[in-house]
Image (cartoon, rainbow, N blue to C red):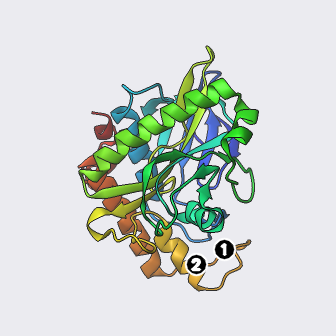
Amino acid sequence: MPEAAQHLGSGKVRELYALDDERLLLVASDRISTFDVVLPTEIPDKGRVLTGLSAFWFAHTRNLGANHLLALRPDGRSTECRRLQMLPIECVVRGYLAGSGWKDYTATGSVCGHALPAGLAESAKLPEPLFTPATKAATGHDENIDRGAAAELVGAALLDEVEQASLVLYRCAAGHARERGIIIADTKFEFGLDGDGGLVLGDEALTPDSSRFWPADQYRPGGPQPSFDKQYARDYCDSLGWDKTEPGPELPDEVVAGTRARYIEAFERLTELAFDHYLTDPEVVLR
Protein backbone atom coordinates (compact mmCIF):
# COMPACT_ATOMS: atom_id res chain seq x y z
CA MET A 1 0.00 0.00 0.00
CA PRO A 2 1.31 3.51 -0.79
CA GLU A 3 2.52 5.28 2.35
CA ALA A 4 -0.11 7.36 4.21
CA ALA A 5 -2.88 6.26 1.86
CA GLN A 6 -6.13 4.46 2.64
CA HIS A 7 -7.11 1.63 0.32
CA LEU A 8 -10.64 2.26 -0.93
CA GLY A 9 -11.17 -0.56 -3.38
CA SER A 10 -9.96 -2.80 -6.19
CA GLY A 11 -11.14 -2.88 -9.78
CA LYS A 12 -10.36 -5.39 -12.50
CA VAL A 13 -7.08 -3.59 -13.18
CA ARG A 14 -6.70 -0.69 -10.74
CA GLU A 15 -6.27 -0.20 -7.01
CA LEU A 16 -7.83 2.95 -5.55
CA TYR A 17 -6.44 4.83 -2.54
CA ALA A 18 -7.44 8.01 -0.71
CA LEU A 19 -4.58 10.47 -0.27
CA ASP A 20 -6.71 13.11 1.46
CA ASP A 21 -10.20 14.62 1.20
CA GLU A 22 -9.55 16.02 -2.28
CA ARG A 23 -7.11 13.60 -3.91
CA LEU A 24 -7.11 9.95 -4.90
CA LEU A 25 -4.31 7.67 -6.05
CA LEU A 26 -5.02 5.26 -8.91
CA VAL A 27 -2.50 2.44 -9.29
CA ALA A 28 -2.72 0.42 -12.51
CA SER A 29 -1.68 -3.21 -12.12
CA ASP A 30 -0.59 -5.57 -14.89
CA ARG A 31 -3.80 -7.60 -14.57
CA ILE A 32 -5.79 -8.28 -17.70
CA SER A 33 -9.47 -9.12 -17.95
CA THR A 34 -11.34 -10.69 -20.82
CA PHE A 35 -15.12 -10.97 -20.95
CA ASP A 36 -15.12 -9.18 -17.56
CA VAL A 37 -13.10 -11.96 -15.88
CA VAL A 38 -9.63 -11.18 -14.51
CA LEU A 39 -7.18 -13.77 -15.84
CA PRO A 40 -4.58 -15.44 -13.61
CA THR A 41 -1.75 -14.35 -15.95
CA GLU A 42 -0.46 -10.76 -15.94
CA ILE A 43 0.94 -8.76 -18.89
CA PRO A 44 4.27 -7.14 -17.88
CA ASP A 45 4.20 -3.31 -18.03
CA LYS A 46 0.54 -3.22 -19.04
CA GLY A 47 -0.31 -0.94 -16.11
CA ARG A 48 2.40 1.50 -17.13
CA VAL A 49 1.08 1.61 -20.69
CA LEU A 50 -2.43 2.37 -19.43
CA THR A 51 -1.21 5.05 -17.04
CA GLY A 52 1.17 6.71 -19.49
CA LEU A 53 -1.24 6.69 -22.40
CA SER A 54 -4.10 8.05 -20.29
CA ALA A 55 -1.84 10.82 -19.01
CA PHE A 56 -0.81 11.62 -22.58
CA TRP A 57 -4.45 11.98 -23.65
CA PHE A 58 -5.36 14.01 -20.57
CA ALA A 59 -2.59 16.45 -21.47
CA HIS A 60 -3.41 16.38 -25.20
CA THR A 61 -7.11 17.15 -24.68
CA ARG A 62 -7.02 19.50 -21.68
CA ASN A 63 -8.05 22.41 -23.94
CA LEU A 64 -11.28 20.52 -24.74
CA GLY A 65 -12.46 20.11 -21.15
CA ALA A 66 -11.43 19.42 -17.57
CA ASN A 67 -9.94 16.09 -16.49
CA HIS A 68 -8.97 14.60 -13.15
CA LEU A 69 -5.19 14.32 -13.60
CA LEU A 70 -3.06 16.08 -10.97
CA ALA A 71 0.29 14.28 -11.21
CA LEU A 72 2.11 11.16 -12.33
CA ARG A 73 4.29 9.31 -9.85
CA PRO A 74 7.81 8.09 -10.75
CA ASP A 75 6.76 4.43 -10.91
CA GLY A 76 4.88 5.17 -14.16
CA ARG A 77 1.77 3.31 -13.03
CA SER A 78 0.35 5.62 -10.32
CA THR A 79 -1.78 8.68 -10.97
CA GLU A 80 -2.76 11.35 -8.44
CA CYS A 81 -6.18 12.66 -9.36
CA ARG A 82 -9.07 14.77 -8.19
CA ARG A 83 -11.93 13.24 -6.23
CA LEU A 84 -15.12 13.30 -8.28
CA GLN A 85 -18.70 12.18 -7.99
CA MET A 86 -18.60 9.65 -10.83
CA LEU A 87 -21.62 9.30 -13.12
CA PRO A 88 -23.32 5.88 -13.19
CA ILE A 89 -22.90 5.36 -16.95
CA GLU A 90 -20.14 4.36 -19.34
CA CYS A 91 -19.86 6.87 -22.19
CA VAL A 92 -19.11 4.82 -25.28
CA VAL A 93 -18.43 6.40 -28.68
CA ARG A 94 -18.44 4.17 -31.75
CA GLY A 95 -16.91 5.23 -35.05
CA TYR A 96 -17.04 1.75 -36.59
CA LEU A 97 -19.43 -1.17 -36.43
CA ALA A 98 -17.78 -3.76 -34.17
CA GLY A 99 -18.23 -5.80 -31.01
CA SER A 100 -21.61 -5.51 -29.29
CA GLY A 101 -22.56 -2.76 -31.74
CA TRP A 102 -22.23 -5.19 -34.64
CA LYS A 103 -24.27 -7.82 -32.77
CA ASP A 104 -26.96 -5.24 -32.03
CA TYR A 105 -27.02 -4.10 -35.67
CA THR A 106 -27.33 -7.62 -37.09
CA ALA A 107 -30.24 -8.32 -34.75
CA THR A 108 -32.14 -5.02 -34.98
CA GLY A 109 -30.63 -2.77 -37.67
CA SER A 110 -29.82 -0.29 -34.88
CA VAL A 111 -27.13 0.32 -32.29
CA CYS A 112 -28.39 1.40 -28.86
CA GLY A 113 -31.42 3.01 -30.42
CA HIS A 114 -29.57 4.61 -33.35
CA ALA A 115 -31.12 3.40 -36.62
CA LEU A 116 -28.45 2.71 -39.25
CA PRO A 117 -28.53 2.18 -43.02
CA ALA A 118 -29.17 -1.39 -44.17
CA GLY A 119 -26.37 -3.51 -45.59
CA LEU A 120 -23.43 -2.30 -43.50
CA ALA A 121 -20.57 -4.77 -43.15
CA GLU A 122 -18.89 -5.78 -39.93
CA SER A 123 -16.19 -3.21 -39.03
CA ALA A 124 -17.67 -0.66 -41.47
CA LYS A 125 -17.07 3.00 -40.74
CA LEU A 126 -20.27 4.57 -39.46
CA PRO A 127 -21.74 7.63 -41.22
CA GLU A 128 -21.08 9.61 -38.02
CA PRO A 129 -19.66 8.63 -34.63
CA LEU A 130 -22.39 7.42 -32.28
CA PHE A 131 -22.74 8.05 -28.57
CA THR A 132 -23.95 4.75 -27.10
CA PRO A 133 -24.09 4.73 -23.28
CA ALA A 134 -23.90 1.64 -21.12
CA THR A 135 -24.58 0.80 -17.52
CA LYS A 136 -21.68 0.35 -15.12
CA ALA A 137 -21.54 -3.13 -13.67
CA ALA A 138 -19.68 -3.67 -10.41
CA THR A 139 -19.57 -7.35 -11.33
CA GLY A 140 -20.43 -9.06 -14.60
CA HIS A 141 -21.00 -7.36 -17.92
CA ASP A 142 -21.84 -3.74 -18.68
CA GLU A 143 -25.07 -3.48 -20.66
CA ASN A 144 -25.78 -1.18 -23.59
CA ILE A 145 -28.71 1.15 -22.99
CA ASP A 146 -30.51 3.69 -25.13
CA ARG A 147 -30.49 7.42 -24.62
CA GLY A 148 -33.76 7.43 -22.72
CA ALA A 149 -32.48 4.97 -20.12
CA ALA A 150 -29.25 6.97 -19.75
CA ALA A 151 -31.24 10.18 -19.23
CA GLU A 152 -33.16 8.51 -16.42
CA LEU A 153 -29.84 7.77 -14.68
CA VAL A 154 -28.14 11.17 -15.00
CA GLY A 155 -30.80 13.63 -16.20
CA ALA A 156 -31.44 14.86 -19.73
CA ALA A 157 -29.44 18.10 -19.52
CA LEU A 158 -26.34 16.44 -18.07
CA LEU A 159 -26.60 13.64 -20.62
CA ASP A 160 -26.55 16.22 -23.43
CA GLU A 161 -23.36 17.69 -21.95
CA VAL A 162 -21.77 14.26 -21.56
CA GLU A 163 -22.67 13.27 -25.11
CA GLN A 164 -21.15 16.39 -26.62
CA ALA A 165 -17.98 16.08 -24.50
CA SER A 166 -17.58 12.42 -25.50
CA LEU A 167 -18.00 13.10 -29.21
CA VAL A 168 -15.57 16.03 -29.15
CA LEU A 169 -12.94 13.93 -27.36
CA TYR A 170 -13.41 11.00 -29.72
CA ARG A 171 -13.13 13.10 -32.88
CA CYS A 172 -9.97 14.80 -31.59
CA ALA A 173 -8.34 11.51 -30.59
CA ALA A 174 -9.44 9.67 -33.72
CA GLY A 175 -7.88 12.34 -35.94
CA HIS A 176 -4.62 12.27 -33.98
CA ALA A 177 -4.48 8.48 -34.09
CA ARG A 178 -5.38 8.18 -37.80
CA GLU A 179 -2.42 10.37 -38.71
CA ARG A 180 -0.23 7.87 -36.84
CA GLY A 181 -1.63 4.76 -38.48
CA ILE A 182 -4.22 3.74 -35.88
CA ILE A 183 -8.00 3.64 -36.24
CA ILE A 184 -9.87 4.14 -32.97
CA ALA A 185 -12.91 2.03 -33.76
CA ASP A 186 -14.61 2.80 -30.47
CA THR A 187 -13.75 3.94 -26.97
CA LYS A 188 -15.24 4.34 -23.52
CA PHE A 189 -15.06 7.44 -21.33
CA GLU A 190 -16.06 7.95 -17.71
CA PHE A 191 -17.05 11.35 -16.34
CA GLY A 192 -17.67 12.74 -12.89
CA LEU A 193 -18.74 16.00 -11.30
CA ASP A 194 -16.45 18.22 -9.24
CA GLY A 195 -17.53 20.09 -6.12
CA ASP A 196 -19.02 22.89 -8.23
CA GLY A 197 -21.00 20.52 -10.44
CA GLY A 198 -18.58 20.86 -13.36
CA LEU A 199 -18.14 17.93 -15.74
CA VAL A 200 -14.70 16.29 -15.47
CA LEU A 201 -13.18 13.42 -17.47
CA GLY A 202 -11.92 10.72 -15.09
CA ASP A 203 -10.72 7.11 -14.84
CA GLU A 204 -8.64 6.20 -17.93
CA ALA A 205 -8.88 7.58 -21.43
CA LEU A 206 -8.24 6.13 -24.88
CA THR A 207 -6.16 3.14 -23.82
CA PRO A 208 -5.97 -0.39 -25.24
CA ASP A 209 -8.23 -1.50 -22.38
CA SER A 210 -10.96 1.07 -23.02
CA SER A 211 -10.75 1.22 -26.83
CA ARG A 212 -10.48 -0.80 -30.01
CA PHE A 213 -7.28 0.21 -31.82
CA TRP A 214 -6.89 -1.12 -35.37
CA PRO A 215 -3.85 -0.79 -37.66
CA ALA A 216 -5.04 1.51 -40.45
CA ASP A 217 -2.91 -0.14 -43.13
CA GLN A 218 -4.62 -3.50 -42.51
CA TYR A 219 -8.19 -2.21 -42.29
CA ARG A 220 -10.57 -4.29 -44.40
CA PRO A 221 -14.29 -4.01 -43.58
CA GLY A 222 -16.28 -7.22 -43.77
CA GLY A 223 -15.05 -9.03 -40.67
CA PRO A 224 -13.04 -8.67 -37.45
CA GLN A 225 -9.87 -6.57 -37.62
CA PRO A 226 -6.36 -7.12 -36.23
CA SER A 227 -5.84 -4.89 -33.24
CA PHE A 228 -3.40 -3.24 -30.81
CA ASP A 229 -5.65 -3.86 -27.81
CA LYS A 230 -6.48 -6.87 -25.64
CA GLN A 231 -8.46 -8.50 -28.44
CA TYR A 232 -5.42 -10.72 -29.07
CA ALA A 233 -5.72 -12.22 -25.57
CA ARG A 234 -9.52 -12.26 -25.83
CA ASP A 235 -9.36 -14.24 -29.10
CA TYR A 236 -7.05 -16.80 -27.51
CA CYS A 237 -9.41 -17.27 -24.57
CA ASP A 238 -12.38 -17.55 -26.93
CA SER A 239 -10.60 -20.26 -28.95
CA LEU A 240 -10.46 -22.53 -25.89
CA GLY A 241 -14.21 -22.99 -25.61
CA TRP A 242 -14.06 -21.35 -22.18
CA ASP A 243 -17.48 -20.51 -20.75
CA LYS A 244 -16.37 -16.96 -19.78
CA THR A 245 -16.90 -17.49 -16.07
CA GLU A 246 -14.44 -17.65 -13.16
CA PRO A 247 -11.74 -18.86 -13.16
CA GLY A 248 -10.21 -17.56 -16.36
CA PRO A 249 -7.59 -19.52 -18.31
CA GLU A 250 -3.84 -19.07 -18.00
CA LEU A 251 -2.22 -17.32 -20.96
CA PRO A 252 0.77 -19.02 -22.64
CA ASP A 253 4.05 -17.14 -22.96
CA GLU A 254 3.52 -16.34 -26.64
CA VAL A 255 0.13 -14.73 -25.97
CA VAL A 256 1.60 -12.73 -23.07
CA ALA A 257 4.47 -11.52 -25.27
CA GLY A 258 2.17 -10.76 -28.19
CA THR A 259 -0.27 -8.82 -26.03
CA ARG A 260 2.52 -6.82 -24.36
CA ALA A 261 4.01 -5.98 -27.76
CA ARG A 262 0.66 -4.72 -29.05
CA TYR A 263 0.11 -2.50 -26.01
CA ILE A 264 3.58 -0.98 -26.30
CA GLU A 265 3.27 -0.42 -30.05
CA ALA A 266 0.00 1.45 -29.50
CA PHE A 267 1.70 3.59 -26.84
CA GLU A 268 4.68 4.42 -29.05
CA ARG A 269 2.64 5.20 -32.17
CA LEU A 270 0.17 7.45 -30.37
CA THR A 271 2.64 9.32 -28.17
CA GLU A 272 5.55 9.26 -30.65
CA LEU A 273 7.75 8.41 -27.66
CA ALA A 274 9.87 5.36 -26.93
CA PHE A 275 8.29 3.32 -24.14
CA ASP A 276 11.71 3.01 -22.46
CA HIS A 277 11.83 6.82 -22.34
CA TYR A 278 8.54 6.82 -20.46
CA LEU A 279 9.84 4.23 -18.01
CA THR A 280 12.78 6.44 -17.07
CA ASP A 281 10.82 9.74 -17.11
CA PRO A 282 7.02 9.29 -16.90
CA GLU A 283 6.33 13.03 -17.08
CA VAL A 284 7.59 13.07 -20.67
CA VAL A 285 4.00 12.28 -21.77
CA LEU A 286 2.78 15.55 -20.25
CA ARG A 287 5.12 17.83 -22.19
Q: Which mark is residue 96?
A: none
Q: Is residue 123 above or below residue 22?
A: below
Q: 237 or 44, which lies in front?
A: 237
Which residue of the protein is positioned furthest toward the top in this rendering?
A: 196
Marks 2 and 1 in Cβ contact (< 8 Å): yes
x, y percentage for residue 275?
29, 54
Q: Which residue is mark 2?
A: 237
Tag 2's secondary structure? helix
x, y percentage for residue 54?
43, 43
The quadrant of the image that shows the C terminus is: top left
Q: Quadrant of residue 276?
A: bottom left
Q: Is residue 19 visible?
A: no
Q: CA distance from mark 2 to mark 1?
A: 8 Å
Tag 1's secondary structure? loop
Q: Residue at x 39, y 28 (%)?
A: 62
Q: Amino acid at mark 1?
A: Gly
x, y percentage for residue 211?
47, 54
Q: 165 or 202, which lies in front?
A: 165
Q: Residue at x 54, y 72 (%)?
A: 234
Q: Is residue 261 above or below residue 139?
A: below
Total marks shown come to 2
* Mark toward the start of the polypeptide (2 vs 1): 2
Q: Which residue is mark 1?
A: 248
Mark 1: give few (<14), some (14-19) or many (20+) Cα within 10 Å: some
Q: Is residue 168 visible?
A: yes
Q: Residue at x 30, y 70 (%)?
A: 218
Q: Amino acid at mark 2?
A: Cys
Q: Residue at x 66, y 41 (%)?
A: 147
Q: Is residue 60 left or right of residue 136?
A: left
x, y percentage for residue 68?
51, 29
